[in-house]
Image (spheres, rainbow, N blue to C red):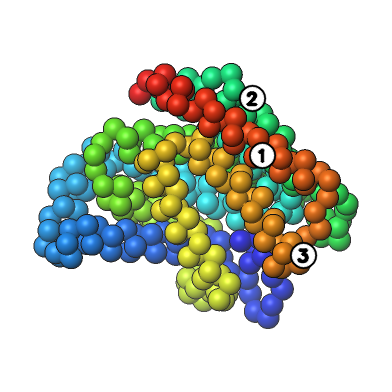
Amino acid sequence: MRYSRTLKEDGPRYLASSAVVSAEILKIFTCTLLVFMENNYNLRAMNLLLKDEIVNKPVETMKLAVPAGIYTLQNNLLYVALSNLDAATYQVTYQLKILTTALFSVSMLGKKLGLYQWLSLLLLMAGVTLVQWPTESTEEQKVLTVGSQFVGVVAVLIACISSGFAGVYFEKILKETKQSVWVRNIQLGLFSFVFGFLGMMVYDGQIVRESGMFHGYSAITWIVVFLQAVGGLIIAVVIKYADNILKGFATSVSIIVSTLFSYFLLNDFNPTGLFFLGAVLVIAATFLYSYEGKAASSAIKV
């Protein structure tokens, strides 16, 4: 996403609000296909299921409007952040979502985290910070204005809070019902599409009317849209069968993995001593959290 927002190429840059809407459309289509498969490729059975779960249960459906609106805001904020911050600062700051998620999990789900788990959260934060700590000023950092950095940091902080709340809220809904996770994501996607489309028309309506929704799209843009859509569905499965804090750990470990890919495949990263120290802390934090995971799970009150 960062690459797509900073890529210098001929023609205008794509609209972030449009990319958010496109990802939601792709998610809805994918989830509908999965529900179709779950119903043994029976179109009538799928239609009856969707009508029963979405239309005939308006109260249950409306519950998804809250996380949908927050997720839409969060997705737009991430594009704002990555348009105004360098990748290192963004990655470090965005890991605050792990702590916000833990706090919301304790307050909303009644989870009890043990001492080791709290320590693991602190270790994780320290490790990710060291891994992403900028070692020297780059030309990109020099051209960033104080104003744009402030906008980027505020966008990330709001995204962290919204991510924590929406993720835990959605987890609570998923675990309180036996409904298919794909049906829930269709409900979530429908609301997200409406909110995203309204936001796009409010902020970028003139450009959309003049040049179309896919104004400035390229192959890289479609890759970003695809990854955002698929990533959202994978996260939903993680939330259903694990929890949001584990999702945060997976995200943090992915930073380490992506850094290794950058070094060995893309050759655009030179590891430092801080990187290795941070990697050790992240791995240690993951093991520390898992060490008390079984004991903590027995203390969860929903």
Residue 181 seen from this side: yes
N-term-proximal mark, 3 vs 2: 2
Relative to residue 270, is residue 247 depicted above or below? above
In the image, residue 102 lies at what x, y percent?
53, 29
Residue sitting at x 34%, y 50%: 185
The quadrant in which residue 230 appears is bottom left
Residue 130 seen from this side: no
Q: Mark 2 is on which residue type? A: Leu
Q: Which residue is mark 2?
A: 119
In the image, residue 152 lies at what x, y percent?
69, 48
Q: Which residue is mark 3?
A: 268
Q: Tell me the mark number nearer the camera, choosing from 3 and 1.
A: 1
The residue closer to the viewer here, 289 or 176, is: 289
Q: Mark 1 is on which residue type? A: Val
Query: Between marks 3 and 1, how big is the CA–CA gap?
Result: 22 Å
In the image, residue 29 lies at what x, y percent?
33, 64
The quarter of the image holding the N terminus is bottom right
Give the farthest residue toward the bottom: 10
Q: Mark 3 is on which residue type? A: Asp
Element carrying mark 2: helix
Is the Cβ of the residue at disc 3 closer than 8 Å to that at disc 2?
Answer: no
Relative to residue 54, is residue 109 depicted above or below? above
Is the Cβ of the residue at disc 3 closer than 8 Å to that at disc 1?
Answer: no
Q: Which residue is mark 1?
A: 282
Q: Residues within 10 Å of mark 2 (few under 14, many from 20)?
A: some
Total marks shown come to: 3
The quadrant in which residue 194 appears is bottom left
Residue sitting at x 64%, y 24%: 119
